[in-house]
Amino acid sequence: MRAVARNTAADGVRNKFESERERAPVEVEECVTSEANRVAATGRPAPNAAEKLKHASPNLMTDAELLEQLLLAANHNVVPGEGIEDVRPVKAMLENGIELDDVLFTLKSHIDRRAYPKNRALASWSERRFVVAVAEAYGRHASSAS
């Protein structure tokens, strides 16, 4: 017991747990100063391009800015064409009380292939599977807020 208290073993070797405690502040400092290790220091990853744009009010965004956010959240897993260029369905969702975060979350989890490699590409913002997933995310978000 005394050997542990003095941080040495009977043979004079330092206690390995104490040496790890001494190194901990250095490792934490390294995590804070390193942008690559920001996840370990703050508990959340560095913001990506979509998160940097997300702070603009949906009412103040142009269609091009909204489209850019949507494409970034979906990681461009869309079929290029008129259905994707027309953001009116998403604007209608936003005007009816659905938050942009719910739409972006749905894109990241149901469309982006990084979340699930077999996610199918989205051909239109009014595609049924996308609209239903946004409604479900909104329902979960609204029920947890009350």
Image (cartoon, rainbow, N blue to C red):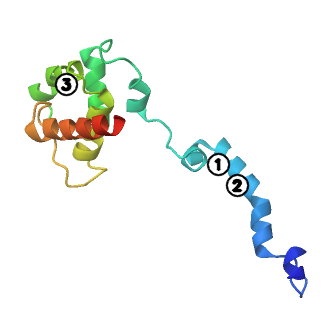
Residue 70 seen in this snapshot? yes
Give the mark, 2 or 3, whose residue is nearer the N terminus. 2
Characterize the local packing of mark 2: few (<14), some (14-19) or many (20 or more) Cα atoms within 10 angstroms: few
Q: Of residues 102 and 73, which is closer to you in this image?
A: 102
Above or below, comparing residue 27 to residue 95 in the picture:
below
Characterize the local packing of mark 3: few (<14), some (14-19) or many (20 or more) Cα atoms within 10 angstroms: some
Residue furthest to the front in view is: 146
Residue displayed at 25% across by 27% down: 98
Q: Calculate the distance from the C-alpha at mark 2 to the C-alpha at mark 1.
A: 6 Å
Residue 76 seen in this snapshot? no
- Quarter of the image for residue 65 reads top left
Q: Calculate the distance from the C-alpha at mark 2 to the C-alpha at mark 3.
A: 45 Å
Of badges 1 and 3, the one in the foreground is 3
Which residue type does callout 3 highlight? Met
Q: Is residue 84 left or right of residue 49?
A: left
Residue displayed at 90% across by 80% down: 2
In the rendering, which numbered label is found on residue 27?
2
- Quarter of the image for residue 73 reads top left
Characterize the local packing of mark 1: few (<14), some (14-19) or many (20 or more) Cα atoms within 10 angstroms: some
Q: Is residue 66 left or right of residue 29?
A: left
Residue displayed at 28% across by 22% down: 66
Q: Label 1, on which residue?
A: 31
**Where's residue 55, x and y in %?**
41, 23
Which residue type does callout 2 highlight? Glu
User: Contact, CB < 8 Å: mark 2 with mark 1?
Assistant: yes
Q: Label 3, on which residue?
A: 93
Quadrant in which the N terminus appears: bottom right
Q: Calculate the distance from the C-alpha at mark 1 to the C-alpha at mark 3.
A: 40 Å
User: Contact, CB < 8 Å: mark 1 with mark 3?
Assistant: no
